[in-house]
Amino acid sequence: MTLVGPSSVTGNTLALSHCKGSCANIDLPALGYDTFCRSFFDIAAAGKLRAVATGPEIRREMRSLLRARRLYRPSRDELRILGRSTADGFSVVKVEFDLECGVPVRGCLGIPDGEFKGLILLGHGMASTPERCFDDADKDYMNALGKHLCQDGYVVWCPYIVQIGNQESQNNIAAMLASHGISAHNLSCASLDAGEIVCRKLTGASGLNVGVYGVSWGAFLALHLEAATGRMRPTVVSGYMRDEKKFLMSSVISKNLGIELAAYIHFANSRAKYTGWQLADLIHPCPLFAEIGSRDGANATELGRDEKFAEMQSVYASSGHAHLIDIDVFDGVHEVSGKRARPWLYGHLASPAYQETSRLKNAIAL
């Protein structure tokens, strides 16, 4: 099924120009994510997809992007436990469950051995996997962020962002889902948001303060999730701050887009609108911290990094919340740092102000 996978295939190996292809060549076949993604087409062919969404309400301004009035909600079925593993100071449970629209979600919940300090919803980026986020044996640009968060005492939910290693595969799956009235963007945001339910079912813990940490494409999802729901959870975005119009017209993205129609369906519905001041207008006063590598080609100054952050900063300042937004341009490439971001996130989660800004904590009914 060539339209599902990357355009560059050598024998049975998926070849990527970034991360040396280790995610696609090692993780995807070994962990079954290639089969998992292709199963979506079988589910669609069997008539099991439904354009149903009854989860948290989506703000009117974001509905054109997420193609519904609400996020997709996890079905009432039990979680399917796919595996458990232990590490230094924490354990990881791999689970799968279905959303009400008929699409399955697969992800990992990292559980600290000691007392829980809070819950982090972690959105990984393209060409990575949840398992890789909890293991530093074969690092990629996620830099084992999930492991570090768990070792600091936080439960971490990281769902698999559906793709088979690159932009083309994500576009094709998104196009197929769109043909059945289902938004891949809504699917990804709903998968991330389901972390509170997964955590409660697997650990029994409720009332945890919740933060969001998105990396690369996952950062885009993190921003849109908070803008869509208005929950005001402290949020870190790593590897994302740019003018989306400049990015979509640049060689950085054009080299990735192999199928124009699929890409059009995926990027349509005003994706480029939800950046800069328009986005800040929706999410403020959500505590927001951005971290960008100084040599990150996808978020370079020529792609509007400084301009877009200044726009967002201005919105926060004009509403009297200048202290709730910050940025760290660290010495690095397109990767996670966490040096300033993690202490910032922990501080906001432990702050008494959290109770005021994250008003919907505990509001999810099982």
Image (cartoon, grey):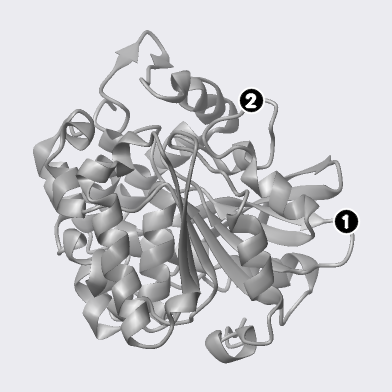
Between 113 and 323, the one lying in front of the other is 323
Kindly give the residue lying farthest to the top in the view shown.
11
Image quadrant in which you'd find residue 165: top left
Q: Residues within 10 Å of mark 1 (few under 14, many from 20)?
A: some
* 105 relative position to 111: left or right: left
Q: Quadrant of the C terminus?
A: bottom right
Q: Secondary structure at mark 2?
A: loop
Q: Secondary structure at mark 1?
A: loop
* 234 vs 95: above or below: below
The structure residue drawn at horizontal position 62% and vertical position 83%, both measured from the top left corner, is 354
Between 221 and 106, the one lying in front of the other is 221
* 46 vs 295: above or below: below
Q: Tell me the residue that label 1 is attached to.
A: 113
Image quadrant in which you'd find residue 183: bottom left
* 329 vs 47: above or below: above
Q: Tell me the residue that label 2 is attached to.
A: 138
Tally the numbered discs. Answer: 2
Question: Where residue 31 sits in the image (x, y, percent)?
Answer: 59, 32
Question: Where residue 69 sits in the image (x, y, percent)?
Answer: 29, 81
Between 34 and 214, the one lying in front of the other is 214
Q: CA distance from mark 2 to mark 1?
A: 23 Å
* 74 vs 128: above or below: below
The structure residue drawn at horizontal position 15% and vertical position 47%, both measured from the top left corner, is 246
Question: Where residue 335 sits in the image (x, y, percent)?
Answer: 49, 38
